Image (spheres, rainbow, N blue to C red):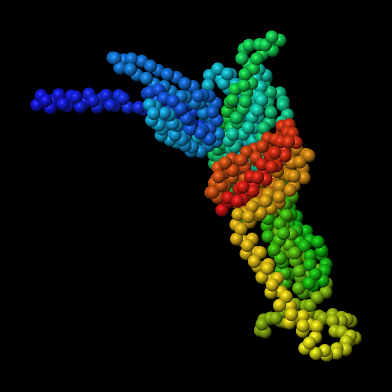
Amino acid sequence: MKVKHYISILFICLLTGLVSAQVKFEAKVSKKKLGVNERLRIDFEMNKDGDNFVPPSFNDFDVVGGPNTSVSNSWLNGKRSYTKTYSYFLAPKKRGKFTIKQATIEIEGEIYKTFPITINVTAAVDAPNGNSGASDIAAQNIHLVAEVSKTDPYLNEAITVVYKLYVSPETGVSNWREKDNPRYNDFWSQNIEIKGLNIQKGLYKGEDYRFVVLRKTVLYPQKTGKLKLEPLVLDITVEVPTGRADIFGRPIMTKVPKTVTAGSRTVNVKPLPEVGKPADFKGAVGDFNFKVTTTKSQLNATESLQAKIEVSGKGNLKLFELPKLSVPSSLEVYEPEHKESVRTRLSGMQGTISDTYTIVPQYKGKYPIPTISFSYFDLQTESYKRVNSDELVVDVLEGPTASISNTESSETMVTKQPVSPNSNTFAFIKTKPNWVGKTHTPFFQSTAFWSLLLTPFFAIPIVIFIRRNKDKRDADIHGNRIRKADKLSRKYLGESKKALNNKEAFYVALEKALHNYLKAKLNIETSDFNKEKIESLLSQRNIDSTNISEFISILENCELARYTPITQDTMQSDYNRSAKTISTIDKQIR
C-alpha cells in the first residue's frame, strides 16, 4: 500500500511539472461586441519568450495604436512566472461580424498559433470608449449633430435631417470621411446635394463654435409609430493643442484620429385621420392643384386626341397614384404615358406629375368625359380636400354613325338618326384607271433564274467561313468576358472621360456611371443605393472582397472629391481605377 501511495504522489508531481512547463500562446480581446465608434484592444499573450511574432492581418479594422510590448517576470514561492504581451488598439471600419485570424510565434523551435476570434460590430453607441489625453480633448471640442425639422410628422409628410459638424475655436479638422451611413428603412429618402462646405459661426450649448453642414436629407415616413433614425458616423482627424508653443509663440498641435456620431433620433409618425377620409383617397399629402385637359375638342373619327390628368404643387408627388380616366366605350383609349417633373428641395418635393391618355373616336357624335375627382390631405388645415375637374365634351364631326339595336317590345321604341347626305360619298372608288401593259418573259434561263441557281454555290463557302469564325469566337470564353467588360466600361465611363477637365462635372458623371453600371448588372433602382446593399449584392455574386472594397472606395472618392482640391493626375487615376474595377467585376459576376 505504501509503495502504491508513493507512486501516486510521484505521478502527480510529474504531471504538475509537465503542466507548468506547457507553452501557452493565446489572444484576448477587451470585448467581443462593440459599437462602430468604439475601440478594441487585443492582447497576444505567451508564458515563454519567443521569436518571429507575426500578427494577423487586421483587414476590417484600422490600427490606431500598437504594437505595444510588455513583459512581466516574477517569482512566487520559488516558482517563476513569465508573461510577454503584444497589444494593439483597433478601430472597426464598418458594421458587421468580422474574424481576427491567427497570430503565430516561434517558441523553442516550435510554431504556436492563437485561435481566431469573432468580433460583432454594431451601430454607434452613445458613450464610446476611447483613449485619454488628446482624445478626450478632441471629444470635448468636436460634436456631430443631427437636426430634425419635425419630430411628430404625419404619414407621408416631408421632414428634413441636417447633419452639422461643430468644431471649437481651439481645435481643427484636417480630414474626415463617412464611416457609417444611416439607413432610413421606413422612409422614402433623398439626399440634397451640397455645393461646397461653407464654414459658419454658431452656438453649441451656449458656447461659440464653428460649424459646417455635411449632409441634408429629405425623408417621407412610410409607417406610423415611433421610427428610429440611425446615426451618421464619421472618422475625423482632429488637430488638438498640446499646451506647448514653438519659438514664435504659436501653439503646437497634435493630430488625433477620432470617431464621432450624431446619435440616434426618434420620430413619432402620426397616422392620417380616419374622420372625413374620402373613399377615393390615394395617399396624397401636401398642397396640390388638379386639372384635366384635352388637346382637341372637335375632330373627325379615327383621328386622335390626348387627355392629360395633371397634379401640381408641393407634397409627396412620387408616392401616390393619379385617378383614372373614364370615357364612353365608343372611344378607344390607350395606356397612359406617365411623366414626372419633380424637384426635391430641403422643404420637400415640388413639381408636376401627369398621365397622358391617347383617345381615338370610332363614330360620329358628341361624347362627354365625366368629371374626375382628386382627394388629398392638406397639412395646413389638417383636413382632407377634394378637387373636381370640369366635364369635357369630345365632338366628333365626321365619321360612321354607330348603329343602335334595341329589342322590339311594346315598351321600347327604335330611335332613328337622320343621315346627312355627302356629295363625295364614292370618293374612295377610283374613276380613272391607270392600266399598265404587261409582257410575259420566260423565267427559264433568265437573269433571275441564273442568279437564284448560282447564289447558293457562292454563299455556302462564305457562310462556312463566317460560322467557323463565330464558333472560334464563342469558344474563347475568357476573351469574350474581356471584350464584354471593356465594352461596358467604355459605355458607362464615356461621359466622365469627356469631363476630365472639369472636376465637379467629372465626379458627377463618374458617380452616375458607377450607379448605371450597378443598375444594369444588379437590377436595382437608384433610390435603393447604399454602400451596405451594394456590398451585399456584389458578395452574393461571388465578387472578391478586394474588388468590392475598391468599388466602394471609388464611390466615396466621388462624394468627397467634389468638395476638396483635386489635381488632374488624381482625376485621371480615379478614371483608370474605375475602368479597371468595372472590367474586373464584370469578369467575375455571376
Q: Residue at image x 60%, y 57%?
A: 477
Question: Which residue is nearer to you in this view: 319 or 411?
Answer: 319
Percent across and percent down for residue 517 are 65, 49
Residue farthest to the left, as pictured: 1
Please indicate, yes or no, whether residue 315 appears anywhere in the rendered image: no
Please indicate, yes or no, whether residue 482 appears anywhere in the rendered image: yes
| Total tally of numbered discs in the picture | 0
Q: Residue at image x 34%, y 19%?
A: 81
Percent across and percent down for residue 276 are 62, 50
Name the quarter where the N terminus is drawn: top left
Determine the image quadrant of residue 249. Answer: top right
Determine the image quadrant of residue 392. Answer: bottom right
Determine the image quadrant of residue 261. Answer: top right
Q: In this view, does 391 lie above or below 220?
A: below
Q: Is residue 23 above or below residue 289?
A: above
Question: Would residue 316 appear left or right of 231 to someone viewing this image?
Answer: right
Q: Residue at image x 83%, y 67%?
A: 298
Question: Which residue is nearer to you in this view: 208 or 453?
Answer: 453
Percent across and percent down for residue 350 are 73, 45
Q: Residue at image x 36%, y 15%?
A: 74
Percent across and percent down for residue 217 are 65, 38
